Amino acid sequence: MNEDIKQKLVRWRLIVGQAGVDNRAGDVELTSQQSIMDAALAAIYDDTTSTDGKQGGASKQGGLGNSSPRLAKWLVDVRTFFPPDVVSVIQNDAIERKGFTKLLLEPETLKNITPDIHMVGTLLALKGQIPEKSKFLARQMIRTVVDDIIKRLGQELRRAVTGAINRRNHSPLSNVSAIDWKRTIADNLRHYNPDTRCIIPQKFWFFERSRKQKQWSVILDIDQSGSMMDSIIYSSVMGSILASLPTLDTHVVAFDTQVVDLTDLCRHDPVDMLFGLQLGGGTDINKSVKYCRTLITDPRKTIFILISDLYEGGVEAGLLRRLQEMRDAGVKVITLLALSDEGNPSYDTDLAKKIAKLGIPCFGCTPDRLPELIEAALKERDLMRFGKSF
């Protein structure tokens, strides 16, 4: 048997597990490292693994049992022998297929978890069950993912907003009314021209204004449904980034059947904001949109982004009427059916069609397209080109 065929057989053996091996192909000899990989996969995917992690037992259950040390060792093995993207899949399958929520509840196992957005979503859903001894590690894990999102999105999002707003400003001076004439004249006396009998200033000094003028308002209205988990996390972090920009007045609102204004938390710490979310429950989009309308002071300088799968439990006719009124008043209204890496939402297609007929763009979006979308809205371009064709 040549080496290429042997490697293919080994890969196939790791894929199908011991129970799925084709007897006609004979037994495949695994190295010690491959045996560890095989046992780690068998614990999640092989129903013939015994509770002590050994193969060939009579048990029909997965093989991690209830022992924290055993779970911790399994996590170390997974992180050691598989690439990061595969680790994330295996960890999520451990929770979804085997119900190993203990991965996220005990410090012995939590510290070995590879942080990713899906794991953070599960952790937030379980936040009420996290014991006190694990809360610090849980926050650290969430902050790692939040910081990574800010690193990926922050610079481009800030550039898009700053570029769009500055392009609309034509004054060569920051603010003529804020010039400190006394200091400017004193500093430029050396540039006095006796022929013209004028001071030719080389540098202007300005009084520092206590607060920069907010030129646009952005309102994020986030559906807290459990199915929107990735969208909730990305939307919350996006809100935090936008809130840090002095030219924007940013509001972050979350809803199920109740409405919660998270703006203050958003401006200080996105991790606190995520912990402030109440995941699950019903959905009353109409009630939330009604509240968000009270935050609008200048409709033509406001971007309203509804992030929801549109499974409305409230008054649909009222929702459509309010969205239409906002759009007619000049608000840039956008409906994001999902804000996730996949960008393929599951949503109420009937309601999405009705919203799209109002001239409101309605589509799923990956995080990397957010800066482009916000920039287009600030430049008052037609946003329907982003939308889904219904």
Image (cartoon, grey):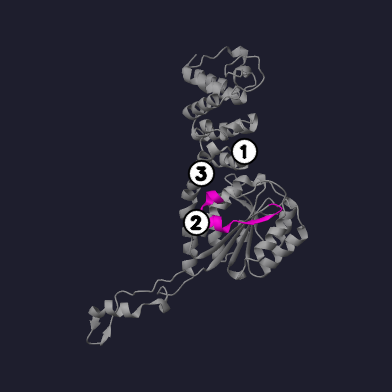
Q: Is residue 371 above or below residue 209?
A: above
Q: Is residue 6 left or right of residue 331?
A: left
Q: Nearer the viewer, mark 1 or mark 2?
A: 1
Mark 2 or mark 3, whichever is nearer to me: 3
Mark 2 element type: helix
> If you read the primary sequence from the N terminus, does the residue marked by circle 3 or circle 1 appear first?
1
The Cα atoms of the two marked residues, 2 and 3, are separated by 18 Å
User: Residue 286 appears in which quarter of the rendering?
Assistant: bottom right
Q: Mark 1 vs mark 2: which is more N-terminal?
A: 1
Question: Which quadrant: the C terminus?
Answer: bottom right
- Circle 2: residue type: Leu
Locate residue 332: give its quadrant: bottom right
Is 303 located above or below residue 19 in the figure? below
Marked residue nearer the N-terminal end (2 or 3): 3
Give the extent of the magenta segment.
256-272
CA separation, marks 3 and 1?
Answer: 21 Å
Please rate how many residues cluster around mark 3, counting C-alpha atoms within 10 Å: few if below 14, some from 14 to 19, many from 20: many
Q: Nearer the viewer, residue 22 or 60?
A: 60
Residue wearing tag 3: 145
